[in-house]
Amino acid sequence: MLRRLRKLLEAIRTALRWVKWYTVIQAAVLVGMLRQHRQIVSCWPELPVTLPPKVVIFVHFDRKGAVRPQLLSYMREFAAGGRAIVFVTNAGLLKPEAEASLREICSAIIIRRNRGYDFGAWREAIEHLGLPRADTEELILVNDSVFGPLRPIGDVLEKLDYGTADIWGLTESWQTRYHLQSFFLAFGPAALRSAAFAKFWVDVRPVPAKSYIVKIYEVGITQTMLKAGLRCAAIWPYDALTSMVDEAALARLLAAEESDLGKTDPIHVTRKLQVMKVRDCVARRIAMNPTSDLWRQLLLSGFPFIKRELLRDNPTEVQDIGDWANVAREIFGAAPETILADLRLMMKDSAP
């Protein structure tokens, strides 16, 4: 009976998704096709902008035009790794002190209206600056959807081997269809010179529907590159993360449960529940979001970020996220105070 009810509820949810896709989303697509994709308010410096062979386009949004100190640290690490930073804010404005700090780090700053989310901003920066140029060797697209880095990212940048893959992400997902998650996408020479890369960005439109952006652009860019014969890879592969949640990991939790503390400690209980959830998804081949459902395995593997959405909203109802700060301290020796300061401004009706 319970199984039938679950199937009925899933059928209803699927039907509602299709109704939304063919009504609300299609109306949003029409708006996106009619909208002008050029939404730049101002740029610094004026064209032409001199850029080296390796460029990072960093997309940002904050309603008040502020820039978190962690983002400045993140960009400084890119600069230390030999990359020029193009900062693009979708806020439509920047606080004077934020812009002053950015000018010390960035090669260019673009202020635009929030049309088309991250992909609209990336498209406009690529078009405005004429990227890729004849000497462009690497283009990295990132956004501000993560907390961190919790450790230096120099070794992450060293792993971007374009002899092994043409496009790199930090993580990969099988939700909807296989794709590299778009908070960090790095394109090497073969990808940048491909017709598929150029055509993809020309086709990006400022559609005012996040679900469309995710399905057509976030998932679509990886699928487009793969169909063009380009190689895509993640530094933290999905199967490597799920393999960490093996029988031995479960056995250790069950053994700890034999102690009085293991039987009563809620933190221990939530860890076991999350391990059971992950193993259930693996057994039934249900795709998970690695930056949410496998956050602990990512940190244990040296992943230097925590998704802001995970700590703020926990959209996939991760069971064991309550001890994130202790995990960050234990693994990286990272102080969570800067993250907690942001959460104080972001969170509603919950605790960090």
Image (tube, helix red, strand yellow):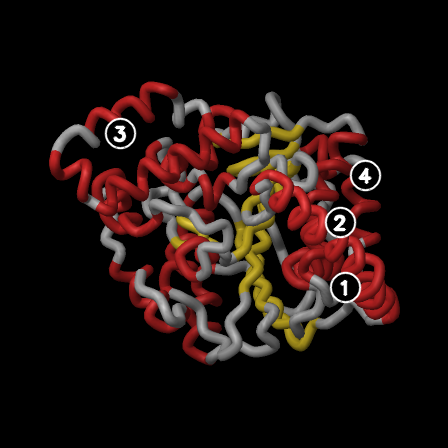
Assess disc 2: are there few (<14), some (14-19) or many (≥20) residues with their C-alpha within 10 Å of its C-alpha: few
Name the amino acid, label 4: Ala
Above or below, comparing residue 37 to residue 319 in the picture: below
Q: Residue furthest top?
A: 248
Is mark 3 in CB contact (under 8 Å) with mark 2?
Answer: no
| Res 228 → quadrant | top right
Closer to the chain start, of discs 4 and 3, is: 4
Q: Give the left or right position of residue 7, taking residue 27 as reference.
A: left
Question: Mark 4 falls on what kind of element?
Answer: helix
Assess disc 1: are there few (<14), some (14-19) or many (≥20) residues with their C-alpha within 10 Å of its C-alpha: many
Q: Which residue is drawn at the image coordinates 68% and 53% (left, top)?
A: 13
Name the amino acid, label 2: Ile
Q: Which residue is drawn at the image coordinates 73% and 67% (left, top)?
A: 208
The quarter of the rendered structure image containing the C terminus is: bottom left
Q: Which residue is mark 3?
A: 253
Closer to the chain start, of discs 2 and 4, is: 4
Separation of residues labelled 3 and 2 (CA atoms) = 40 Å
Mark number displayed over residue 196? 4
| Residue sitting nearer the eye, 178 or 318 | 318
Is mark 3 in CB contact (under 8 Å) with mark 1?
Answer: no
Q: Which residue is drawn at the image coordinates 44% and 53% (left, top)?
A: 310
Separation of residues labelled 2 and 4 (CA atoms) = 15 Å
Q: Which residue is mark 2?
A: 216
Residue 333 in the image: x percent, y percent? 22, 44
Above or below, comparing residue 252 to residue 224 in the picture: above
Above or below, comparing residue 183 to residue 256 in the picture: below
Q: Which residue is mark 1?
A: 207
| Residue sitting nearer the eye, 199 or 84 | 199
